[in-house]
Amino acid sequence: DQQVKQNSPSLSVQEGRISILNCDYTNSMFDYFLWYKKYPAEGPTFLISISSIKDKNEDGRFTVFLNKSAKHLSLHIVPSQPGDSAVYFCAATNTGNQFYFGTGTSLTVIP
Amino acid sequence: ETGVTQSPTHLIKTRGQQVTLRCSSQSGHNTVSWYQQALGQGPQFIFQYYREEENGRGNFPPRFSGLQFPNYSSELNVNALELDDSALYLCASSLVGQDTEAFFGQGTRLTVV
């Protein structure tokens, strides 16, 4: 049972434009959500997170939006840079000890 | 800089063998979790250790076992290896409790032949 889903396996965006990565979840008990970025041959790197009591969290070029009623979150990257090209994983938890990950979206930023 | 290190980085084992993977947690972190990432999939939770005790387990059989040591380093042991165990194994350290991110090591790529 895939409780966290990323339905877009890949996304290509021109440099300088906005990248929007989407994530859906099914478990309404999830109360903390995270985005990780992964380069080949490296472990996932924490990017940004959001608590369920918020609907938006911003950190520099990265903003995460949470829509609890739709069980949907998104990651916006503005402006996109070639160095942002990586696989992005959405994750969620309700216990703090187990993270449920999506299958990832491969972002390519075209110079 | 995460500070989580895993060894070895790559490993090839034969079906039926046993394997031990190691992880050194980030300084100050008291919790370590292990994840399995199969090709094309997201990381799947295996288990977590806190204060040297198992503190949650995912849907993995008992032949997957672990240890956490007083210095918060950890081992993942897999017995009776199967071909489907071939995957990237990730270790993550964190502070116990909610609203906290986990920091991952670079992973160990295990191939079972």
Image: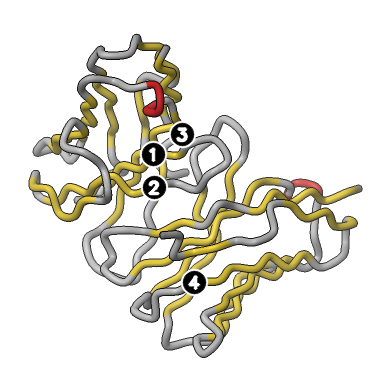
Q: Residues within 10 Å of mark 1 (few under 14, many from 20)?
A: many
In 3D space, how far apart are the residues under numbered discs 2 and 1 (Cα atoms)? 5 Å
Q: Which residue is mark 4?
A: A25
Please state the horizontal and vertical placement of residue A89, each as a whole percent of the image.
Answer: 55, 55
Tell me: B20 left or right of B107: left
- Secondary structure type for disc 2: strand
Q: Are marks 2 and 4 on the same chain?
A: no
Labels 4, 3: front one: 4
Judge whether B82 appears above or below B103 on screen. above
Residue found at x 48% / y 36%: B38
Q: Quadrant location of residue A31?
A: bottom left
Say which label, 2 or 3, has the lower sequence index.
2
Q: Residues within 10 Å of mark 2 (few under 14, many from 20)?
A: many
Labels 2, 3: front one: 2
Q: Which residue is mark 3?
A: B106
In 3D space, how far apart are the residues under numbered discs 2 and 3 (Cα atoms)? 15 Å
CB under 8 Å between discs 2 and 1: yes
Q: Looking at this view, is B47 or A44 the one in front?
A: B47
Say which label, 3 or 1, has the lower sequence index.
1
- Secondary structure type for disc 3: loop
Q: Which mark is residue A68?
A: none
Q: Which residue is mark 2?
A: B44
Q: Which mark is residue B36?
A: 1
Tell me: A8 left or right of A31: right
Say which label, 2 or 1, has the lower sequence index.
1
Amino acid type of disc 1? Gln
Q: Are marks 2 and 1 on the same chain?
A: yes
Q: Are marks 3 and 1 on the same chain?
A: yes
